[in-house]
Amino acid sequence: AERVHDLVPSEGGPRPGLEAMAKEWYAHAAPAEKQTTKATDGARPPASVVLCCGGDGTFNWVSTVLLELELEAPAGAAPFRPDLVPVPLGTGNDLSRALGWGGAYPGEQGLGGVVAAAREAPRGASLDLWAVHFDTARPKFPQMENYFSVGVDALAAKRFADLREANPEQFKSQTKNKAVYASEGAKLAVSGATTLNYKVKQLLVGGEACELPEGTKSIVVLNIPSFGSGTDPWGKGTHLRRRKDFAPPAVNDGLLEVVALRSVADVPKLMALGAATAGRISAARVGQGSSVRIVFEGAEAAQEEHPTCCGLWKKKSARTTLAAQVDGEAWEFPFASEVIDITLKGRVGVRFGPEHAAGEGISAGQVDGSKGAPELGWVPESAASKRADAEANAASSTSSVSAA
């Protein structure tokens, strides 16, 4: 049976629809001990397919709720784990591109074909989901599946989002959205942007300290080979440290790729040209690993005088905030002494579209820090932490009610 649920925040977003599907699943599913979570054809029971119609942030929203519902599953029941398929209605649509479902809405006439293709598509590999934790600030999106970035590209995304929120009726065209996004990036190219070398105290990738190239304007953490409307900065990036042991990137390998963008002009290039920017952006490979930690300088150190980009004189930075984004959703945060950690949270099942090359970007097994992690669902450590937080919140609420 097919159902359509409107993801209106005031109506509960994706939760009511997913809860209804889960309820039906639990009424008919076999006990957990008779099922397996391996992501190969025939290994998993028949699954529902959920089409996430929207941008990258919408897919993030749906997968976040899906993992939350796993913690509410009836005792002994096999978790409700549908396969997810993105339908590109956003601006960049990077996940849809990476999974082979295209970068633009197919139109009403083509939508039926997408539904049919999603239903018949082979069951693909899982997609890694990552927890994004700030020590003091509160991230707008605490889960990442495509990319996380901090710097000038995130600032352009924040300015674009502010304009769209103020005048939503003017942002109904993907082409116009990209033009506005590129325009905001071009403005930053003229006015200048913060150099992160003087803000970041330490960058750890897989526990290893990594060097940022001079003039870094953005740090980009990748889980998929698509960023900024179809560009693959890792694939086009230069090797900063002459390393030869990087593994081929995959969406389910438990690894992240970190690149540095060194030019403010990269932002308008990414939005205006997308995948056509191959070789035209200033990306440098920084590292690859199972976790990322970014440690920022304290307020005083971050505001010390430092050379300008041309090196002719020095200036003192008065900036106290930086912009960050997760899957295209951006915000600003006070960066002084902040610590950002990105760690593996879990995995969801996905199906690949007709534009995806068979086997591309898929890991045959789990590597590095993800050894022992389940093919689907929560990483055990993350699930335990989530449950502990929920219990602590419940206990705090009970105490507050008792005190009242």
Image: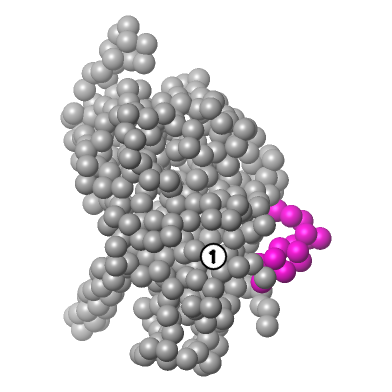
Please tell me whether residue 181 is drawn above or below residue 42 in the rendered image.
above
Q: Position of residue 316 (x, y in %)?
A: 27, 19
Q: Is residue 14 in view?
A: no
Q: Residue furthest right?
A: 109
Label 1: few (<14), some (14–19) or many (≥20) C-alpha neighbours in 10 Å: some
| Near-viewer residue (215 or 243) | 243
At 25% from the left and 39% from the top, the residue drawn is 203
Report the quarter where the N terminus lies. bottom right
Q: Is residue 121 magenta?
A: no
Please tell me whether residue 22 is drawn above or below residue 331 in the rendered image.
below
At 56% from the left and 81% from the top, the residue drawn is 46
Question: In the shown orientation, is residue 121 left or right of residue 247?
Answer: right
Q: Is residue 108 magenta?
A: yes
Q: Point out the stretch of residues depicted in magenta.
A: 105-119
Residue 67, image quadrant: bottom left
Q: Which residue corresponds to mark 1?
A: 124
At 40% from the left and 40% from the top, the residue drawn is 220
Report the quarter where the C terminus lies. bottom left
Q: Position of residue 347 (x, y in %)?
A: 42, 65
Helix, strand or loop for the magenta stretch, by majority: helix
Q: Is residue 47 in view?
A: yes
Q: Tell me which amino acid carries mark 1.
A: Gly
